[in-house]
Amino acid sequence: MSSTRSRWFSPRALFLHVALVVWVGGCATAAYWQVGRAAQGNALSFLYAVEWPVFALIGIIGWWALLHLEEVTEHQVKARQEYEEKMRAEAQIARQLDEPEDPTLAAYNDHLNSLSQAPKKKLWGH
């Protein structure tokens, strides 16, 4: 019950609900206005009258997707870290076996390596 409650009634979810109502309401208003303009003889408004409901549908799909993002588990984080470390170790071995690198390329690779080891920002769902 608590996961359902946090999914639908958390502060983030409530913000998404309000944003959806505003978005769909705005799209419905714009579609209604375009239908009126089309009835007055503006041929291009027929296209816009169809386009606004499509935008509303895209908003609904985005709302649903944002509500159903799954939290990243500790196991997933650990598995990703192990995979990244394994890839770094394989790259290091491959570099040692290859012929000597260009100094500029070596400096660039060192820079990329330092970036990959820096703490990463928290991304939504990653």
Image (cartoon, helix red, strand yellow):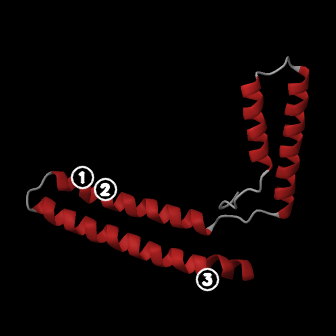
Disc assigned to residue 51: 2
Residue 53 left/right relative to 78: left
Locate residue 14, reporting x and y percent: 55, 80
Dot 2 alpha-carbon crowd within 10 angstroms: few under 14, some 14 to 19, many 20 or more: some
Q: Which residue is drawn at 86% across and 19% down?
A: 98
Residue that carries the numbered disc 3 in the rendered image? 9
Residue that carries the numbered disc 1 in the rendered image? 47
The residues bearing labels 2 and 3 have C-alpha atoms spaced at a distance of 31 Å
Q: Which image quarter is the C terminus in?
A: bottom right
Q: Residue at x 20, y 63 (%)?
A: 34
Residue 29 left/right relative to 93: left
Q: Tag 1's secondary structure? A: helix
Residue 94 left/right relative to 47: right
Q: Do the residues labelled 1 and 3 touch (CB within 8 Å)?
A: no
Q: Which circle's residue, 1 or 3, is located before the other in the chain? A: 3
Identify which residue, 77 or 52, lies in the foreground.
Answer: 77
Extreme-left residue of the structure: 41
The residues bearing labels 1 and 3 have C-alpha atoms spaced at a distance of 37 Å
Q: Can residue 37 be seen?
A: yes
Extreme-top residue of the structure: 99
Look at label 3 and name its amino acid.
Phe
Disc assigned to residue 58: none
Dividing the picture into quadrants, the one containing residue 88 is: top right
Q: Tag 2's secondary structure? A: helix
Q: Are marks 1 and 2 in contact (CB under 8 Å)?
A: yes
Locate residue 51, reporting x and y percent: 31, 56
Dividing the picture into quadrants, the one containing residue 58 is: bottom left
